[in-house]
Structures are given as C-alpha cells and as structure tokens.
Image (cartoon, helix red, strand yellow):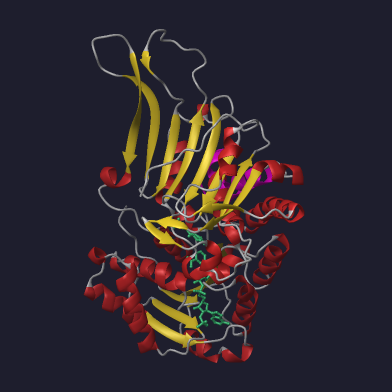
Amino acid sequence: MSPATTVEPCDFVVFGGTGDLAVRKLLPALYLRDRDGQLPAETRVIGASRAGLDTDGYRDKVRGELARFVSGDQLDSDTCERFLNRLEYVTVDVADSADWAGLQDCLVDREGAIRVFYLACAPGLFGPICENLALNGLADAQSRVVLEKPIGHDLASARAVNDAVGAVFEESQIFRIDHYLGKESVQNLLVTRFANTFLEPLWNSSSIDHVQINVAESLGVGSRGGYYESAGALRDMLQNHLLQMLCLVAMEPPTYVDRETVRDEKLKVLQALKPMSPQDVERCTVAGQYGPGLADGKAVPGYQDDVENPDSTTETFIAVKAEIQNWRWAGVPFYLRTGKRMDRRCSEIVVQFKPVPHPMFPGSEGHSEPNRLVIQLQPHEGMRLHMTAKEPGPGGIRLKPVSLDLNYIETFKRPSPDAYERLLMDVVRGNPTLFMRRDEVEAAWEWVEQILVGWQKSERAPRRYPAGTNGPTDATTLIERDGRAWHEGVTA
Ligand SMILES: NC(=O)C1=CN([C@@H]2O[C@H](COP(=O)(O)OP(=O)(O)OC[C@H]3O[C@@H](n4cnc5c(N)ncnc54)[C@H](OP(=O)(O)O)[C@@H]3O)[C@@H](O)[C@H]2O)C=CC1
Ligand SMILES: O=C1O[C@H](COP(=O)(O)O)[C@@H](O)[C@H](O)[C@H]1O
C-alpha cells in the first residue's frame, strides 16, 4: 500500500452507529486509517442511534468492539485511546423531526469541516434522514452522504429512495457504497485489464468461452435474519456485488479511469444485459435455501430455524446464467453464483478461454485444460493464470496443467486494507469513482426485477441444499447442460 496521505478534517456521522455494520466494519476501518496516520487531529466520529448512550458509554462499547473486530497485531493502546477520544454519541430517532436538536448542537460549531453522513441503517430511513439534515441546515456543500446497499428492494423503491436523497443532495455528494469495489483484487482487475497489453486483444467472444463469478460464504445469516428475510441472496448480493464485478469484467476501456468514465462504461454493460422473460428465468436461474447440515464439521440448523420462520421461502443461494448483448460478448455466458452456508468461503472471478482448436501433440501423455484467469477475492487475494506446460523429462511430451500465481501478501509483503478503509477515505476526498451512480443502481434493479417477477409467476419454492455443500443440484445442472462446470476454488 502506498503511504497514506492525510485527508481533510471531517465530522464522520454514523447513523446506526451502534449497529452491526458500524461496529464490525466502519469503526474498525476508521480506527485503522487513524493508526496509519490518515486522520487529522480535528477529525471526529459521531455515532447516532436511539440507544440512549452517552459519549463515555459509546466509547466503552466501541473499545470492546474494536477488541473483537480488529486483529490483535493491529490493536495498539495509544492509537486505540486516540481514536476513542474522537468519538461522540448523540441519541436521535432519525424518523422524528423533533429529535434532532442534539445532533444539530454537536455539528453546528464546526463550520468548514467536511461532514460525512453514513447511513448505516434501513433504507426506509434514508429519506427521513436527508429531509431532517436539510431542515437542520446540515446538508450544505461541505456535506456528503453515504448510502448502504441494497438501495430499495425493487426498482420503484430504489427510485423513491434516490428521489428522496436527490431532493436534498446533488448526485456528486451522494456515495452509494458497494464494498466489493473497494477490494484490492477487484480494483486490480481494472489495472490488469488496462495497464497491460497482453490481455485486452483476447478479452472478447473470439477467445473467451465463458466467465464465472462465484461468491461462496460458509457462514449462515447469523444475527441478520430480520433484514435477510426481506432481502434474500438476489437483493443482498447479486443486484449489487456480483453485477458490479460483472461490469468491471465486461466494460469497454474508458478513455481514462476517472469518476464518470468508469461509471459510464459500467452502465452500458448493465443496459446490455439480455432481458429475462419468465421462460428465461425458469431456464437460467436457480434459487436455493440451506437446510440443516454441517459447518466446520459441526451440525448446524437450516435457514428456517435460523430465522425462526418454518414457512420462509427466502433464497439463500442463487445461480444465474446471464448474457451481454453487445459486439464484444455476444454468445459468452456469464455464470453468477452466490450462497450462504456453502462448503467453503471462496470468492473468485474465473475467465475461461476457449480450448485449443486442434490437438498439436499426438501421442502425448497427460492432458491439457483450457486457459483460465482466476481473480481471487477471498479467502486470499491474488490472481492465477492456468495454462498447460511440458512436464520436464527425457521421454516424450507429457502435458501438465500448471499455474502462474500472484499472491498479494507474498508479492507486496503486507496485507491488503479492508475495502471499507479505502472507500471511507474516498468519501472524505470526494472521489466517487468506486461508488455506484444512481443510473447504475436503477439499471441493475431493472434487470434483477425481471428475475423477481419470473419467480413470483412460477411460485416455485427455492431448492433445498444441506448446509456445508455447494448448493442445490439444479445449479450444477444449469451449467453442466452447457457442457461446462462450476469452478470450485480453494477451501478455507
Ligand atoms: N451488517 C452488514 O454486514 C451489512 C449491512 N448493510 C446495510 O447496512 C444497513 C445497516 O445494517 P446493520 O448494521 O446490519 O443493521 P443493524 O440492525 O445491526 O443496525 C441498525 C442501526 O440503526 C439504528 N436505528 C434503527 N432505527 C433507527 C432510528 N429510527 N433512528 C436512529 N437510529 C436507528 C439502530 O440503533 P437503535 O435501534 O438503537 O436506534 C442500529 O444502530 C442496512 O441497510 C444493511 O442492509 C450492508 C452491507 C453489510
Ligand atoms: O454486503 C454483504 O456482503 C457480505 C459479504 O461480504 P464479504 O466482504 O465478507 O464477502 C454478506 O455476508 C452480506 O450478507 C451482504 O449484506
């Protein structure tokens, strides 16, 4: 990582400052940026929620959460105390306009400081929060607002949220976060494609057989069952993270990489996704839900028990075959798959090239496999190019599949920062390149909604898969009937 440049002084207000996202991701990320010297002395972090804590109580809570969510080797007591001293807490019911005086008092004397309002709460609160920020004179040009995904639960509700936020803030002040865009290996995809010459001539339907985007999680829904019941894998993961990665794989080279050019190109990909008729939905999508099974060798309950709803039909797994209708990608399927309680935690983008057109080594031993470029996001960040080599030996030719590996930690000698660290600093810097623009979010919903409609029409319940497996068998059939197979990555 290049040395951190100090950002401008900022009041960082986290609505939902006591919630899961804040304590697990946002506050640890800010702590780590502080530890790296990126936060100037004047920077404050203000937690806001209805919990009724005072600032000391909030600091105590966050001290405990940092101990849980920051690794021991990164937790030092001096930085910890410095960071905790930046924290303040304000009790506010954001939906109640009469309850905002405390927050106004806390922010009013800080003329000139950048204000970041991070909306780490339910999307139904985004409109009321923005309206109240405006009523309290807190939505000026120095302010920025960060919206967590999923934005809405369908196209109409996403538009309503975007309208409500857009009534108060300019688009340039709105940062719709998708933390996958902050992952080093996802950003490196852009660099690999556009800062090298060898791949781009091959990056099209002439050379590429298909693309897979796999995000397998070994955990279940945990304590987020309330939210997840109304979301499911399609809204929680595919509408945002998986489609954003698809965009980065498929987009045309922008003239240069910059805030609008990248987002313009991603939008064109979303607009070129082949529409899904109800028949396509039937043929090209599989929804699944985990049942009881195993995790780390231990028996775990199924999803319905996890959310205490024996009738739940929420999908915890989805596999989709998507197509992009443009010159570059016509005829190249993009297989997308994500699920909870799968047999491993492994996220990868796999670009599989076409097989050799003619076997050149008659009588050779061993075998060759099609070339594959695998971009690894989790559990380790890296990149692997699979190719065929001659196994050394005095006899005849023996073909051997091998790989050229780039392991980030080994190569760069330091762990990658968490995605939120990078993205939170981008917000303070006012750089929205790695955030989703309104039109992108709505284009993604437009396509995803066709799947939702298809599922509603077919009234088909998600296919069961035992926890600790790689999803329902229908998902295997989805890809195998095209003569292909899911790439099952490393185990962790
Ligand atoms: N957790 C995660 O890993 C991820 C979460 N997200 C998104 O982030 C958002 C927050 O998720 P998460 O942290 O899990 O949710 P939680 O339920 O854990 O936290 C919600 C927070 O909002 C506060 N809150 C709720 N209602 C009000 C209100 N009326 N006024 C003020 N504060 C309120 C809660 O505190 P209190 O009840 O005390 O007011 C709590 O601090 C959601 O939109 C979710 O989809 C996105 C990606 C990952
Ligand atoms: O946004 C979300 O992402 C996490 C997975 O993120 P990762 O960085 O750990 O891969 C997922 O568990 C969660 O359900 C979803 O809301």
Left or right of 304 on screen, residue 407? left
Left or right of 425 on screen, residue 141? right
Q: Name the residue: 67% across, 52% down.
A: 448
Q: Name the residue: 55% across, 91% down.
A: 101
Q: Dividing the picture into quarters, in which one does residue 329 lie? A: top right
Which range is magenta?
A: 247-272
Residue 103: give x, y in percent of width and height. Answer: 51, 86
Is 265 colored magenta in this rendering? Answer: yes
Q: Dividing the picture into quarters, in which one does residue 174 lie? A: bottom right
Residue 161 vertical placement versus 266 (above, below): below
Is 250 colored magenta in this rendering? Answer: yes
Residue 298: give x, y in percent of width and height. Answer: 37, 59
Q: Name the residue: 57% across, 45% down.
A: 247
Q: Name the residue: 34% across, 31% down.
A: 404
* Nearer to the camera, 242 or 283: 283
Residue 224: give x, y in percent of width and height. Answer: 51, 69
Residue 69 vertical placement versus 252 (above, below): below
Does residue 148 show up? no
| Magenta portion: prevailing SS class | helix
Does residue 245 show up? yes
Left or right of 489 on screen, residue 332? right
